[in-house]
Each structure stands twice: as structure tokens, then as C-alpha cells.
Image: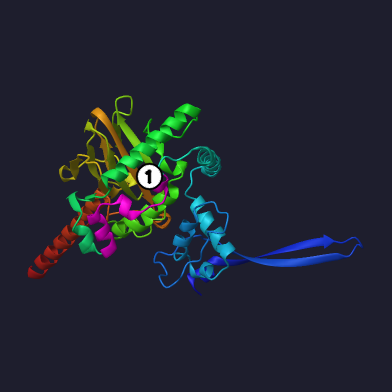
């Protein structure tokens, strides 16, 4: 019997009804329940996922389609409703208490904005590659190979990838759109949600209608790169995002403390204006257990922002932003997430492929094992010579 079959259990429910004539009817219904809800480690790449766009779901339809090939076989052959229930139950396990109700309130809040806000540059809301990206970036994406990506990307520090991405004209349009949105917020006195708990200024791009554009940006232009360089943290299965802009300078946020992002991979692009300071400082990648451990000398790296230039790094790569001492700096960020990776990560204990401290612990453990074996062999040789 397979593990899938062992996990499946038959549950029978008997329903008793009495009609108007007093006749009693008993009906037994049988349902299959599963004692363990886990995704398979290796995807079924031959399976073609269904579309969920026509359903009213708790999560984006793309997430369900992405997860489907990781379903255990007994669920994979089920109907679409059972697949949705199985996947939704798994994803809800990863939401903090009360997150579901907050998500509903946020949906209502977002709809109010989209209904009342009039975009300044409507062309921003559909991603037109020729209007957004520099030619070198487009060429590399179209060739879609590790060689083409490495031809435009530098890696000044392990796990930090830098490349030219956005055209100056696109950056200017995005800056103008953000300014227009903030002007609307001021005029209507609409209370908006900020990007995260650390930034007091900035705006969530998804909230005023740019979510579809950012989905396309992640799926068609970022995921091909992360599939190559960040496969160890779900780079090939990114299926949702949180997109926003942050603002630094006079009368804005000054700096940003040392932290990690709620993402598998983070895209950070400077949109511009004139500014001094604001360097990003990186201090090594860590899992939750090791997030506060000491930084090693080879993990220290500072990056200076250049308008239109992108920085791509793991969300768990510890970093912060130094003070913007003059001028006004605006950055667009895309926190890219993988529901598949988050589910699989919940069943792992060590992350030596990407956590610097886990890697050192594993290396030290291997060294101790080799040392113990060496001592055992030496002792055996001496005993044989005695």
C-alpha cells in the first residue's frame, strides 16, 4: 500500500430524514479524508495544471495553478473543488491568526481606491516591454539562458545580483504616477496603508491597480532569472508578490534598519530623483533560527543605488539602508514569494544550501566526523602494529 493510500481514510456519515407522510429514510454518504496534508517534494512536471480563474478563491488563482503539480497523487486525480480545498487548507496553515479576515478587509479597501482613483499614466498598468526595459535586459530575457543572464548581471557579493533594467522614461512615469496617487490621497484625505511596518512613507502599488502589471513583471521577466540563480529558495516557483514604493529624504523616511524581507526573492529598483546617501548594506543570508548571528567578514557588502538599476537578492539576505542625507530617493520593490517553497520549508530543519550559519554548522559537523574517523583509523593501525 502506498503512503498516499495509507493517508486516505473513508469516513461514513448517516443522515436520517422524515418526510410529511412519516416515512423515515436513512442515507449513508462516504467521504474521503486525509490524515496528512503535505505537498510532494518533487513536482509532477508531466501534469498540466487546471485553470482556476473562474472561481472565487481565498488566494490568487495563479497560486493554485502553480501548486497543483506538487499535489500528492490521490489529490491530483480528484475533482477541481477537492484540489482547491486541499491547497487552500495548506496555505491557510501559513497565515498568522486573523490574517484571513484582514485579507478580506484589505480587499474591500483596495476596491475603494481602484473605484475612485484616476490613473495619470494608464500605459503603466499594462506591461509594455519596449516602454519599460533597457534593450540589453530585453535581449537577455528573450534568449532566456544562464549565459545571456550572466552577460548583463554582475554579482559583486555572493547572492547579490545587479543589472540595468528600467528605462529612464519608465522611471519618470512611475515617479509621476506615485506623486499623482499621493496628491489624490491628500486631497481626499483617504487613509492609505503603508508598504510595511518599517516604512512610514511610500505606497503599495498593488492597491491602486498595478497588481496585474507586477504579476506579469514577476512571471515573465523576474522568474526566468530567479529560476537560474535562486532555485534553492523557490526561484522557479514564484507565484505571488507584494509590490510597493518607498521614499527617503527630507520629510520622508531617513533610513531603514537591519532586517530581512517577507519574500523568497526581492527585486529592488531605484526610480530616482537626485539624492545623496541611502546605500544598501548586506550582511549575509540567514534562516529564522540564525537571523541574529554574527556577520562574517566576507558577508559585508555595501551597494550604491543607481536609477534604473536593479538589485536582486534572497529575502532572507539580511540588509538595511543607510541615511539619505540630502535629496529625495524613491525605490520600487517587489517581494516575490513561492507558496511551494514555504510549504516544503516547513518540513525542513536545516538550510545549508543558502543559510550561511547552517552551512558553517554542517561543515563543522562534517569536520568533526572526519576527525573522529581519522582517530579511529590511527588507533586501529597502532593496535595492529602492537
Q: Residue 135: within the magenta?
A: yes
| Closer to the camera in the image, 321 or 361 | 321
Q: Can you name the residue that lies furthest to the left here?
A: 385
Colour scheme shown: rainbow
**Horizontal relation, residue 339 to residue 173: left or right:** right
Name the residue: 42% across, 48% down. 125
- State whether residue 99 is above or below residue 198: below
Q: Tell me residue 23's x, y (percent).
A: 89, 65
Q: Quadrant of residue 174?
A: top left
Main SS of the magenta part reads: helix
Label 1 element class = loop
Q: Is residue 89 visible?
A: yes
Give the magenta-colored segment's residue range. 122-143
Can you say whether 62 is above or below 3 in the image?
Answer: above
Question: Which residue bears the numbered disc 1?
Answer: 262
Residue at far bottom of view: 1
Residue 290 appears in the picture as rendered = no
Q: Position of residue 295 (x, y in %)?
A: 21, 41
> Measured along the vertical axis of the image, is residue 242 above or below residue 32?
above
Most extreme residue toward the top, as rendered? 251
Q: Residues within 10 Å of mark 1 (few under 14, many from 20)?
A: some
Residue at image x 42%, y 58%?
Answer: 340
Residue 151 image offset from top left, x and y in percent: 18, 58
Q: Which of 166 and 220 lies nearest the eye of the viewer?
A: 166
Q: Quadrant of the C terminus?
A: bottom left
Where residue 271 appears, x then y in whole percent?
Answer: 29, 40
Q: Is residue 6 above or below residue 371?
A: below
Tell me how many marks there are: 1
Q: Residue at x 44, y 48 (%)?
A: 211
Amino acid at each position: 500500500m502506498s503512503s498516499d493510500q495509507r493517508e486516505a481514510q473513508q469516513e461514513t456519515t448517516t443522515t436520517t430524514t422524515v418526510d410529511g407522510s412519516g416515512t423515515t429514510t436513512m442515507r449513508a454518504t462516504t467521504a474521503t479524508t486525509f490524515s496528512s496534508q503535505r505537498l510532494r517534494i518533487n513536482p509532477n512536471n508531466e501534469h498540466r495544471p487546471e485553470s482556476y480563474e473562474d472561481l472565487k478563491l481565498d488566494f490568487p488563482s495563479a497560486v493554485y495553478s502553480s501548486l497543483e503539480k506538487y499535489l500528492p497523487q490521490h489529490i491530483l486525480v480528484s475533482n477541481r473543488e477537492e484540489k482547491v480545498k486541499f491547497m487552500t487548507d495548506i496555505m491557510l496553515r501559513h497565515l498568522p491568526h486573523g490574517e484571513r479576515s484582514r485579507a478580506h478587509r484589505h480587499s474591500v479597501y483596495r476596491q475603494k481606491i481602484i473605484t475612485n482613483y484616476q490613473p495619470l499614466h494608464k500605459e503603466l498598468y499594462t506591461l509594455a516591454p519596449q516602454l519599460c526595459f533597457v534593450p540589453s535586459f530585453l535581449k537577455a530575457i528573450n534568449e532566456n539562458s544562464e549565459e545571456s543572464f550572466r552577460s548583463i548581471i554582475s554579482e559583486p557579493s555572493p547572492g547579490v545580483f545587479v543589472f540595468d533594467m528600467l528605462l529612464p522614461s519608465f522611471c519618470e512615469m512611475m515617479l509621476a504616477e506615485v506623486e499623482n496617487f499621493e496628491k489624490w490621497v491628500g486631497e481626499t484625505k483617504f487613509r492609505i496603508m503603508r508598504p510595511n511596518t518599517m516604512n512610514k512613507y511610500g505606497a503599495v502599488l498593488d492597491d491602486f491597480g498595478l497588481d496585474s502589471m507586477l504579476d506579469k513583471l514577476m512571471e515573465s521577466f523576474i522568474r526566468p532569472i530567479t529560476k537560474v540563480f535562486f532555485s534553492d529558495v523557490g526561484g522557479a516557483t514564484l507565484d505571488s508578490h507584494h509590490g510597493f514604493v518607498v521614499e527617503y529624504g527630507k520629510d520622508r523616511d531617513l533610513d531603514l534598519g537591519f532586517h530581512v524581507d517577507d519574500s523568497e526573492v526581492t527585486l529592488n529598483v531605484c526610480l530616482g530623483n537626485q539624492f545623496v546617501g541611502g546605500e544598501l548594506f548586506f550582511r549575509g543570508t540567514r534562516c529564522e533560527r540564525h537571523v541574529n548571528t554574527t556577520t562574517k567578514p566576507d558577508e559585508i557588502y555595501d551597494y550604491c543605488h543607481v536609477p534604473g538599476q536593479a538589485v536582486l537578492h534572497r529575502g532572507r539576505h539580511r540588509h538595511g539602508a543607510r541615511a539619505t542625507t540630502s535629496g529625495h530617493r524613491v525605490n520600487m520593490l517587489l517581494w516575490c514569494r513561492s507558496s511551494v517553497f514555504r510549504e516544503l520549508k516547513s518540513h525542513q530543519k536545516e538550510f545549508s544550501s543558502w543559510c550561511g550559519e547552517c552551512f558553517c554548522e554542517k561543515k563543522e559537523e562534517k569536520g568533526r566526523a572526519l576527525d573522529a574517523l581519522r582517530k579511529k583509523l590511527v588507533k586501529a593501525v597502532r593496535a595492529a602494529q602492537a
